[in-house]
């Protein structure tokens, strides 16, 4: 076997962006150091600048040792509910408290570890061996529907649908206080200064701010809290949590955004709608409502 790996460029893009997408197990800094050291070649010529513009049809070569990576460790003992599966995709019912993907190949107790065991073919898919074909993410504290691609074609198509905002996602959230009517929250969001893991409302022209739209519809209330149906047209980090906190109704159990104490974050991805990546049939996959979110109205 050759000690050199060849990567085919499918569309115009910067060299460093291409490598980050193809080799997600390596840090951006590591990839830039490989480029700077002359270990990357484009169409056979040494490339030493990260901003080199690639064209569709170009080839990028580097030592195979940087490309080869073990997949997330299979954990057949993890028993997670499967909501749907066929030859192209699967939908997992992720429990609260379990991470969606592994950050390192040595990580365990993630949905990716379960997927690696049940669908071993996902280890060869693009997007990162530690993702095991998972095409989107839910926060560790959030439960609900998580989609998995089982083929390269399905992975490409589902990722395209998510990027184009063609996937409709509905959540259930229990928030503090009483909300009477439906509405839309459309505040741009940006990482909080000094704590980029948290998102805060920002002006549209703030550097790094992302447009975000969250639609809410109250289902029932017990007077102290309200169960909401929530739809998002965008996918900014912590969007639902930050938006609901911004209007004075943080999610129960969300200590980071001012929510009342609870055993878990009361946020659940209850439904995902998309087009089947092979048949283009309209698909709707639902997850049962966890007992903790089954708010009883007065």
Image (cartoon, rainbow, N blue to C red):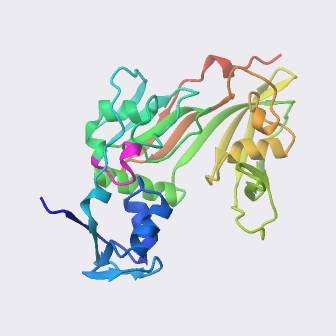
Query: Does residue 247 sit above or below 23 in this rendering?
Result: above
**Whole-percent x, y for residue 53 in the image:** 42, 82
**Whole-percent x, y for residue 65 in the image:** 27, 57
Query: Does residue 53 sit above or below 270 in this rendering?
Result: below
Query: Does residue 164 sit above or below 81 in this rendering?
Result: below
Q: Is residue 278 left or right of residue 32?
A: left
In this rendered view, identify the residue nearer to me: 254 or 272. 254
| Residue ID at (68%, 29%) | 265
**Whole-percent x, y for residue 192 in the image:** 77, 53
Q: Is residue 217 left or right of residue 51?
A: right
| Residue ID at (33%, 35%) | 116
Q: Is residue 56 magenta?
A: no
In this rendered view, identify the residue nearer to me: 51 or 158. 51
Q: Residue 181: name its quadrant.
A: top right
Q: Is residue 188 left or right of residue 288?
A: right
The C terminus lies in quadrant: top right
Task: Find the residue positioned furthest to the left.
Answer: 1
Query: Does residue 13 sit above or below 109 in this rendering?
Result: below
**Whole-percent x, y for residue 244 in the image:** 78, 42
Magenta segment, which residues? 124-133
| Residue ID at (27%, 48%) | 124
**Majority secondary structure of magenta residues:** loop
| Residue ID at (48%, 29%) | 93
The N terminus lies in quadrant: bottom left
């Amino acid at each position: 076997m050759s000690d050199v790996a060849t990567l085919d460029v499918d569309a115009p893009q910067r060299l460093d962006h291409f490598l980050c997408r193809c080799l997600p197990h390596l840090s951006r800094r590591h990839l830039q150091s490989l480029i700077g050291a002359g270990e990357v070649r484009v169409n056979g010529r040494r490339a030493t600048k990260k901003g080199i513009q690639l064209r569709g049809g170009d080839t990028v070569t580097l030592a195979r040792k940087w490309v080869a990576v073990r997949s997330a460790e299979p954990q057949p003992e993890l028993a997670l509910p499967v909501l749907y599966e066929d030859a192209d995709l699967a939908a997992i019912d992720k429990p609260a408290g379990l991470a969606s993907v592994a950050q390192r190949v040595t990580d365990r107790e993630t949905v990716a570890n379960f997927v690696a065991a049940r669908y071993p073919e996902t280890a060869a898919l693009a997007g990162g061996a530690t993702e095991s074909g998972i095409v989107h993410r839910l926060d560790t504290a959030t439960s609900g529907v998580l989609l998995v691609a089982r083929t390269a074609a399905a992975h490409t198509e589902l990722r395209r649908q998510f990027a184009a905002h063609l996937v409709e996602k509905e959540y259930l959230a229990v928030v503090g206080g009483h909300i009477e009517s439906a509405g839309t929250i459309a505040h741009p969001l940006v990482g909080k200064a000094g704590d980029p893991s948290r998102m805060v409302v920002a002006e549209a022209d703030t550097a790094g701010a992302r447009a975000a739209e969250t639609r809410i519809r109250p289902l029932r209330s017990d007077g102290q809290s309200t169960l909401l149906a929530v739809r998002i047209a965008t996918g900014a980090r912590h969007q639902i949590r930050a938006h609901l906190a911004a209007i004075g109704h943080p999610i129960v159990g969300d200590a980071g955004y001012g929510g009342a104490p609870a055993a878990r974050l009361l946020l659940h991805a209850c439904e995902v709608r998309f087009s089947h990546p092979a048949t283009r049939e309209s698909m709707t996959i639902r997850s049962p409502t966890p007992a903790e979110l089954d708010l009883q109205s007065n």
